[in-house]
Image (spheres, grey):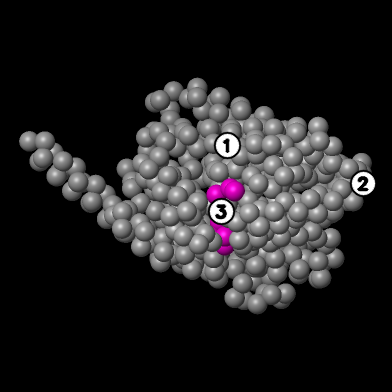
Amino acid sequence: MIETLITYDEALKRRPDEIVEARRNGNKVVGLFCCYTPVEIVHALGLIPVRLGWGGDDNLAEEGIEYITNIQCPYVRQTIGVFKEGKNPYAVNSDVVAISAVCLQEYRMVEVLRYYFGKETLTLSVPKNFYLPEGQEFFEKEVESFTAELEKIAGRKLDQGELRKSVALYADIRKKTAELYDFLLLDNSPIRWGQIIKVIHAGFYLAPETHLSLLGKLIEELKTIPVSDKVKPIGKVRLVLAGSIIAQGNTKIIDVLEGLGVTVVADDICTGQRTFVGLEVKEPTLAGLAKAYLDRTPCAAQLYPEQKTDKRLINLFDLIERHRADGVLYHTLRFCDPYTFRVEENKALLDARDIPFLQLHTDYGANDIGQLQTRIQAQVEIIKRRKKEAAHVGSQAAV
C-alpha cells in the first residue's frame, strides 16, 4: 500500500468544501480546458484554477446529445452532461470557463456551456501555423488579451513578481511529475502507470501547493519501498499508450490493461506525460509563457507540414526508445477526428521501424470491453513470441 496515494484521496475529498469556502470569501474559480491554456496566469492573479472535463460515464455522455449531435466525441458529450446534471462540485463552482481553441469539438462544447448554462467563458485562440514567426506573434497577442480578460475577472492587474512565483511553482510540479514517470523506466516499478494518471488527475483539482507537496512525499515514499515489496512486473511486454484524452473518471482502458496484466511504461496523452513533456517556461513573462506553450509537444490537432519536424512524432519515438517499449497501443475515442485521422500515419511510421502497433477505438460504454481484451491480449502474445524468437536468434548467434 502506498500511503501517499491515500493522502491524495483524502485531500480530494476535502477539496470541494475548500473551494466553496474560498468562493464565500470572494475568490473566483476558473475552470480550464485543454493543456494549451496557461494555468500560471490564472494562479498568479489569485484565481483558483481547476482543469475540467470528464469521461467514463456513458449515461452522462448520452445526456449531452440533447445539446450537440451524437457524432461528437464522448468526452465532449459527457462534459456537457456533467454541467446539465449540475452535481459535480467543480462544474457547479466554476465562475468562468476558459479554453484554448485547439480542438474544435471542445470549442463547440464551451459555446454550449455559455449559451445553455449561462457560464462566463474565455477563449484563447491557438494558431494552426504555430511553427511560423507569424503564428508565434499572434499567440503572444492572444495571451496578452486573455490575461487582460482574466484581470477584469480577478479585479486586479497581473503582478510580475506573482507571475514569477507561479511559473516556478508549476515548473516544480512538472519536474516532480517527470520524476514520478522515471520509476516506470525500472523493470520492477513501485508504482503503476494507472496510479500515476490518477495522481495527475488529482492535481487538476487540488491547490498546486498541496499537489506539489504530495508529489514530493510520494516520490520519497516510493524510493523507500524495499525491492521485495515493489509491484512485480505485471507483464514482460512494455507498451506506450498514445492517442486521445483519458479524462478524469475514465478508467476503462486502464482497467482493461491492468486486468490483463499489461505493463504501460509511458504515454503520449494530454492528461499524462504531455502535461510536462516539452513544456519549459524559460522566461517568467507573458511572452515567455506564450512561447513555451506554443513550442510544447503538440496534440494531433496541431499539424506540422513535415513529418520529420513533427514534435509529437519525435516525442513518441523518444518515449519508445527511452522506456524500452516493445510496442504502441494507440487509443482513440469515437469521433475524435484529430487522433483518428493520424492512425494510418502513425502505423506506417511504426511499421517502418518494425514496432508493433494496435489501435483501440472505443467510447465510454461497456459493450466492447470483451473485444478490447481479446485484441490487446492477442497483440501482447504476438509481441511475446517475437521477443522469444529474437532471444533465440541471439543465443544461436552467440554460439
Q: Is residue 266 left or right of residue 197?
A: left
Seen from the viewer's position, the closer of residues 204 and 154 is 154
- Of callouts 1 and 3, which one flags the residue occurring earlier in the amino acid sequence? 1
What is the number of the mark on residue 177?
1
Separation (CA) of disc 2 from disc 3: 33 Å
Q: Place residue 347 in its image quadrant.
A: bottom left
In the image, is residue 301 part of the stretch drawn in magenta? yes
Query: Chief secondary structure of the magenta span?
Result: loop
Residue at mark 2: 155
Query: Is there any visible trace of residue 57 in the rendered image?
Result: no
Q: Nearer the viewer's eye, disc 1 or disc 2?
A: 2
Q: Amino acid at mark 3?
A: Pro
Q: Label 2's element?
A: loop
Residue at mark 3: 298
Count residues near mark 1 (Cα–Cα under 10 Å), then give few for <14, some for 14-19, many for 20+.
many
Q: Place residue 95 in its image quadrant.
A: bottom right
Seen from the viewer's position, the closer of residues 315 and 320 is 315
